[in-house]
């Protein structure tokens, strides 16, 4: 008798699982395209900024947006929140803002019977899409009130821990050209941001389109594209994107070479950096690369994905030396040097292939 064409049960289950995963990937790619189109109805250009912000959302990380005033940073965050069926909160950071203005506090309340008790008055941090506008205008004490929420997705008030409703996503903005009355974010807080996204000035065509859209009648806000459950499903799917061991080792070598006293560090790193990216930098490289692959409907990460996400992932995690600052060497230039210097395959593999 001839062999049966019906696969055994284990293979059938595996094939069905792969088919489901591929179908989910296709839906993720289509959803990404719909979300970008909805945002594009409001935001002119800034395609790279929109894409990188979506990487942060899908990878369950936070994003820091830096750019001059009037470039649409706040509008982008508000538009994204309108495209997602999530609770939006805005915190306008000022020098007199107190930590309790962010997290909330316990207040004394009375019931109908005259009994008094303390009740939690939740602050704006208890949202799902949080806009921390001009975060560098608040004092370090107030900035630090975000640290626990960003890392633990929870907030401790009067000794009691309060969990945030998922998904929880902080988008902070800062203005790089006004230094008076600002407080630079400490390295510990910068490291909590998965990505630092630079918002560029618009081109002539983009600025013309902005003038057309903003000097006429207001348009209705975009319709929600993703529900809460769909955002959580995308985040879960992002973790299922495959990363081969050679890519993990490549990410580890990139981060390792950013340490100035490392043997593999290029000359520019030794001269221009005081501290390199740490463990979170390597983790963020892999997570952001997974998100980039997922939003393109791919089941695996490529070397190009890690290289593509390297600048927004590493630019705020490397601390320049005095010489690097004096010479005007940016962390983006250092990242480019790392990508050029660090091979995709380690030296011993290249020797074995020769």
Image (tube, rainbow, N blue to C red):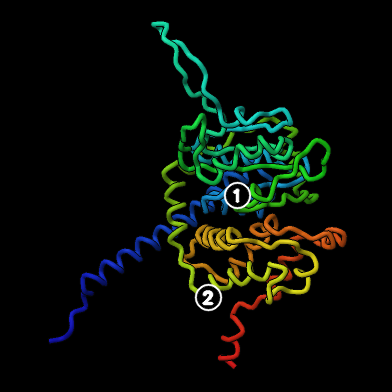
Q: Give the side of residue 281 with respect to residue 229, left or right.
A: right
Image quadrant in which the N terminus is located: bottom left
Which residue is depicted at the point 26% across and 72% down? 11
Position above or below: 210 against 187: above
Kindly state the secondary structure of the residue where label 1 is placed: loop
Residue at the disc numbered 1? 192
Q: Mark 2 points at which residue?
A: 246
255 and 66: which is toward the camera: 255
Residue 51, horizontal then vertical, whole percent:
61, 53
Left or right of 124, for residue 238: left
Residue nearer the viewer, 336 or 200: 336
Q: Nearer the viewer, residue 252 or 17?
A: 252
Q: In which quarter of the image is the C terminus?
A: bottom right
> How crowded is the residue under tag 1: few (<14 C-alpha within 10 Å), some, or many (20+)?
many
Question: Label 1 vs label 2: CA separation?
Answer: 26 Å
**How far from the left and from the top, in percent, is residue 321?**
79, 60
């Amino acid at each position: 008798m001839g062999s049966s064409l019906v696969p055994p049960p284990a293979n059938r289950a595996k094939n069905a699982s792969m088919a489901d995963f591929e179908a989910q990937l296709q839906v993720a790619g289509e959803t990404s395209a719909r979300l970008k189109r909805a945002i594009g109805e409001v935001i002119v250009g800034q395609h790279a900024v929109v894409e990188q912000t979506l990487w942060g959302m899908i990878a369950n990380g936070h994003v820091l947006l830096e750019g001059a005033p009037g470039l649409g940073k706040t509008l982008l965050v508000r538009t994204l929140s309108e495209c997602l069926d999530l609770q939006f909160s805005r915190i306008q950071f000022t020098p007199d803002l107190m930590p309790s203005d962010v997290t909330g506090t316990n207040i004394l309340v009375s019931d109908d019977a005259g009994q008094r008790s303390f009740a939690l008055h939740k602050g704006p941090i208890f949202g799902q899409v949080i806009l921390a506008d001009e975060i560098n205008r608040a004092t370090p004490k107030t900035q630090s009130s975000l640290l626990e929420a960003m890392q633990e997705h929870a907030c401790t008030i009067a000794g009691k821990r309060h969990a945030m409703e998922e998904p929880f996503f902080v988008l902070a903005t800062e203005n790089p050209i006004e230094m008076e009355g600002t407080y630079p974010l400490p390295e510990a807080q910068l490291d909590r941001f998965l990505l630092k996204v630079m918002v560029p000035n618009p081109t002539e065509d983009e600025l013309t389109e902005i003038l057309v859209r903003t000097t006429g009648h207001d348009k209705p806000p975009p319709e929600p594209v993703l529900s809460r459950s769909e955002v959580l499903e995308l985040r879960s799917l992002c973790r299922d994107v495959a990363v081969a061991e050679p890519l993990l080792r490549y990410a580890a070598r990139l981060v390792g070479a950013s340490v100035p006293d490392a043997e593999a560090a290029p000359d520019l790193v030794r001269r221009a950096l005081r501290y390199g990216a740490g463990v979170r930098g390597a983790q963020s490289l892999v997570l952001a690369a997974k998100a980039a692959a997922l939003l393109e409907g791919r089941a695996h990460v490529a070397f190009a994905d890690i290289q593509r996400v390297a600048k927004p992932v590493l630019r705020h995690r490397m601390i320049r030396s005095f010489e690097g600052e004096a010479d005007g060497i940016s962390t983006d230039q250092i990242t480019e040097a790392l990508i050029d210097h660090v091979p995709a395959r380690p030296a011993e593999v290249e020797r074995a292939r020769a």
